[in-house]
Amino acid sequence: MTGTGLLYQGADWNFTIIRDCYNAIEEIAEKELGLDVFPNRIEVITSEQMLDVYTANGMPINYHHWSYGKRFAGHENAYRRGLMGLAYEVVINSNPCISYLMEENSATMQALVIAHAAFGHNHFFKNNRLFQEWTDPSQILNYLEFARGYISRCEEIHGQAAVERVLDAAHALQGQGVNRHSGSRHIDLKDEQARARERRAYEDSSFNDLWRTLPQGSEPEHSGNGEKQALRRRLGLPEENILYFLEKHAPRLAPWEREIIRIVRLIAQYFYPQPQLKLMNEGCATWVHDRIMSRLHEKGRIDDAAFMEVIHSTTNVIAQFGYEQGSTSFNPYALGFAMMKDIERICTDPTDEDRRWQPDIAGNGDAYGTLRHAWAEYRDESFVLQFLSPKVMRDFRMFRLLDDTRDPYLLVDAIHDEAGYRDIRRTVAASYDPSTWYTEIEIVDVDTFGDRTLRLEHRTKAGQALADSDMKLTLNALADLWGYRVVLDEIDTPTGRVLLSHEAGQA
Amino acid sequence: MDIIDRRSNPHGKNLENRRRALERARGAVQKAVRDAVANGKIREVGEGKAVSIPADALHEPGFHRVFTQGERHIILTGNHEFSRGDKLRRPPSGGGGQGGGPGQAGTDGGGEDAYRFILSRDEFLDLFFDDLELPDLIKREISATETTAPSRAGLSNDGSPSQLDLGRTIRYSMARRIGLGRPKPAELDEIEARISELEDIRPLSAVQLDELEALREKRGMLRQRMNRIPWVDPVDLRYRRFAPTPKPSTRAVMFCLMDVSGSMTERMKDLAKQFFLLLHVFLEKRYKTLDVVFIRHAETAEEVDEETFFHDPRTGGTVVSTALEEMLRVQKARYPVQQWNIYVAQASDGDNSPSDTPQVVRLLDEDILPLVQYYAYIEVTGSGSIIRGETDLWQAYRSVAEKQPHLAIRQVSDRKEIFPVFRELFARRTTGEVSHA
């Protein structure tokens, strides 16, 4: 059904208006922009419920843990004291894709959120390669349901304290729960529940090398080494996914403890792509809502007042403060939206500069196709490296500082000019490289023939050691799960020299 | 596309998580609660209030790196004035941990703010009085049973229509109908339908005529039976029955006795007030009804309201026994010992006219202590200006306290000591200790 004329007037909304807006937006999104989305589910909630949703990383269901209570208190206070407005949308990467509308929003905001979340984010979730590789949107909600049920059953059987101990430790190691380098393992969450039941049986029948008690005999030295190598291979060492390793090989864990570690790991994996795609995801959604709302206005479906509200809201969202206002990072909405707009401009109305910088797409006349391709194939780092144009750098008035701790000053070593564009672009891209914020820690060895010491290595970035107190707490958590001594060496990456060595757990 | 209205879904999904967070940080929360009281905000103790918990009590650790030395690049926006080669003064710490030595690295992990929790009144008091309990709570509290309240007491066959238990009535009626074989209306309908069908056929064959006859007879029988066995019979009716149940009422009265003579400074009165208020909140939490009687004394004693008690200055000498007599008078007039738990809290600077002290001891020992659950005597001492050894009154009270364990005496000289003293007085004892008559 395609009507004409105004969809609504004024700020009040009802379910008919939402439905009409949705249909009008869907028509533009699919026919004009060529978006391809998961089926949508739109849920209307109150602001209080929105706070709940925030706390659980946007998930409608989650297991109980004190850390969520803490987060909730944080959000609640910020909200009550007016420090934080509630984001006007939360959307879940699931199939069907769930978007939340807050009941306090005006009709215009509801339409904007539908365009932003139910089409912008939704298209991005469905089409971006990283999301496709790492997440299973069709099963995530069922899996969370299972996880909550499983954990609360464990609490009934083993007590809250015992479960909390494992959860706390596993949460501390969350950042080490993904196979970054060896590629993702696409997990069928549907099978997870059945697998949990089979686990006990499997545990009973499996053989764990760490429990080998047979005497080694007096074999020659080199064959001992050979066996050690074979064992290392069998254990999959070196292993960057510490949670996975603990789940499979920690000698002292009960089956249910392994399952809880697995739950934490799988949920962490589900969230793994999000920070790497924040810029593009928000840029895409903001661009989509901006485009769609403009089209609605052009087609006479919303009035001028509503369109002014859209412009006002979008402008707020994409505000980028400069360093003088104390901003030290990019607003992903601002930079993302600016880059999407810029790509659109380069495709349709390129300057000579654009032809030099972006010969592939400049003037190709297919802005929507180019954007859809970028949304599908890139992540933030490669997207910036490929598409950040001199114009955007100029618009943001970017400049680069060199912070050398040996100097008493900060040096401006590149600004938004011909000589500085490439340096700036490279550095902006590097700041979106996940390796800049993920710590590279690997399990390198297990002393299988001695005291079962677990040996880890942290390959440091130049001059960056681990935060000390946190490292100690986390290492203790790891030792607790492992059950024996744990040693962590911090290695200077180029030389291989051991800079610092820490240990935890009983010998 | 579906639109789902979730607004009516249950709220407060995070209450359980919030409870666990509070539980986890229990030590820190308790400290925050006690600080809030110690900082003189005791007047608001009755309301729910916010407490801040330092972030490290709820810290979630993880492996992460901090930049401590070496080089790094920072991209900023909003350049208006810089060209390549400009040098900027380092911002004074903060801006990302520059210049921090390795020793500072650890603090970077704790960049979270303190967490504020709004506690309800009950949560607040629970945490506040966590390990305190009332001495001798067992005593007379069940004895006064003069109130009654209706409570459910099964079913009865008669009652007012408003108390009709419809579900049960229908259940009985159904059992009776089945038991007596009341025909189902559907059965009758079926027969009627067949009869009218047969009546429409003309001419009727002999077989059909027989059938019609038989059906008519059956119909008559069913109708009769239906009329005889009613749908709902008076014997089916069931009413909810209420019976008056005696309710034990736990009531307590708290006597606040204070010396308001010239030697009591405002500060000393304030200390005493802190103690009274603590006791009040504490008792209020345990007794449904709590009366408070304020008695002030100098040379003479009188019962006053709270405002006058704390704020109206008086001068003159001190005769403590007048206050005790006044207390006994009020107690006899209004608070019979069989119905009330009696608590007394007395605050004084220890001054008393020497000739009065024997009288005080006699009153306490013989008349008051046998009546009360607990008698707390707080001696507020001056802040250094009046350093004395043991006052006469203190010595007198101590001699009584040695014989009567439910007289507790403590000295307090600073606001910070109020709570520890209070805790000490009411700390949970091992069960053996409490058992005295």
Image (cartoon, coloured by chain):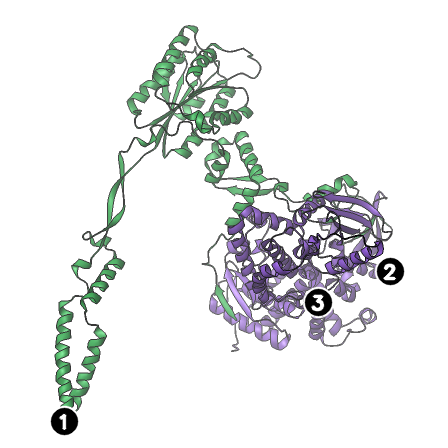
Chain colours: A purple, B green
Query: At label 1, which amino acid type do we have?
Result: Pro
Name the quarter where the C terminus of chain B is drawn.
top left
Q: Secondary structure at mark 3?
A: helix
State the count of labels: 3
Residue furthest front as drawn = A218
Q: Is residue B14 left or right of residue A184?
A: left
Q: Disc 1 versus disc 2: distance between alpha carbons?
A: 114 Å
Position of residue B268 relative to residue B226, above or below, is above
Q: Which residue is mark 3?
A: A341
- At mark 2, the secondary structure is loop
First in sequence: mark 3 vs mark 2: 3
Residue at image location 58% in from the left, 75% down from the top: A27
Residue matched to label 1 = B203
Choose between A199 and A104: the one closer to the eye: A199
Chain to which mark 1 belongs: B
Give the amino acid at mark 3: Lys
B300 horizontally vs B55: left or right: left
Out of A209 and A167, give the one closest to the viewer.
A209
Q: Position of residue A410 (x, y in %)?
A: 83, 47
Q: Nearer the viewer, residue B376 or B308?
A: B376
Q: What's the CA distance linking mark 3 and mark 2? A: 24 Å
Residue occupied by mark 2: A419
Q: Which mark is residue A295?
A: none
Give coordinates of residue B162: x percent, y percent. 23, 53
